[in-house]
Image (cartoon, rainbow, N blue to C red):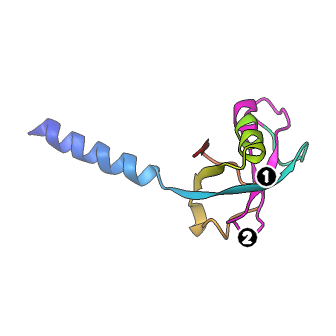
Amino acid sequence: MKYIYITILFFFAFNTAAADIACAGKVTWILADHAACTDEHNKKQFAFKIDTASGLWKCTNSDAASSLVLAAKFESKTLSVYMSDENGATCNSHVQHIKPSYIFIQ
């Protein structure tokens, strides 16, 4: 019984911490070398906009994420961006140059 309680507590703690919002759209703009868009090694990454996010900029966190943004733009694919909902952020209202938790191409 003790393990069931621990499992339930772990499940709720994980779900509360994993409060990402999903925004999907086509990449409309890509900007290189913006000072706010750096990865964990302080290497500059891309800033980008998607058509469903009211013109708000997002940043990539890695070379792989930058490659996904380029591929989505050139292939006219939908890009899904998952980012923190901290401070009530939504797809249409978040801080400029937010760094997503992860992105993928649909």
Front one among 95 and 30: 30
The segment highlighted magenta reads 39-66
Front one among 17 and 80: 80
Q: Secondary structure at mark 1?
A: strand
Left or right: residue 91 versus residue 28 is left
Answer with mark 2 or mark 1, whichever residue precedes in sequence: 1
- Residue at x 91% of width, y 42% of height: 33
C-alpha span from label 2 to label 1? 12 Å
CB contact under 8 Å: marks 2 and 1: no
Q: Please state the horizontal and vertical placement of residue 86, each as a whole percent of the image.
A: 58, 61
Q: Secondary structure at mark 2?
A: loop
Which circle marks residue 31 in the picture? none
Q: Residue 4's image quarter?
A: top left
Left or right: residue 27 versus residue 7 is right
Looking at the picture, does residue 3 appear above or below residue 85? above
Q: For the residue carrying disc 2, how many other residues have a C-alpha within 10 Å: few (<14), some (14-19), or many (20+)?
A: few
**Magenta segment includes 65:** yes
Q: Residue furthest left?
A: 1
**Magenta segment includes 7:** no
The residue to which callout 1 is attached is 48
Residue type (three-letter) at the residue carrying disc 1: Phe
- Residue at x 76% of width, y 47% of height: 73
- Residue at x 22% of width, y 40% of height: 6
Q: Please state the horizontal and vertical placement of residue 8, each as a whole percent of the image.
A: 23, 46
- Residue at x 70% of width, y 38% of height: 68
Tally the marks.
Answer: 2
Q: Please state the horizontal and vertical placement of residue 20, each as a whole percent of the image.
A: 52, 54
Q: Residue 60's image quarter?
A: top right
The residue to which callout 2 is attached is 54
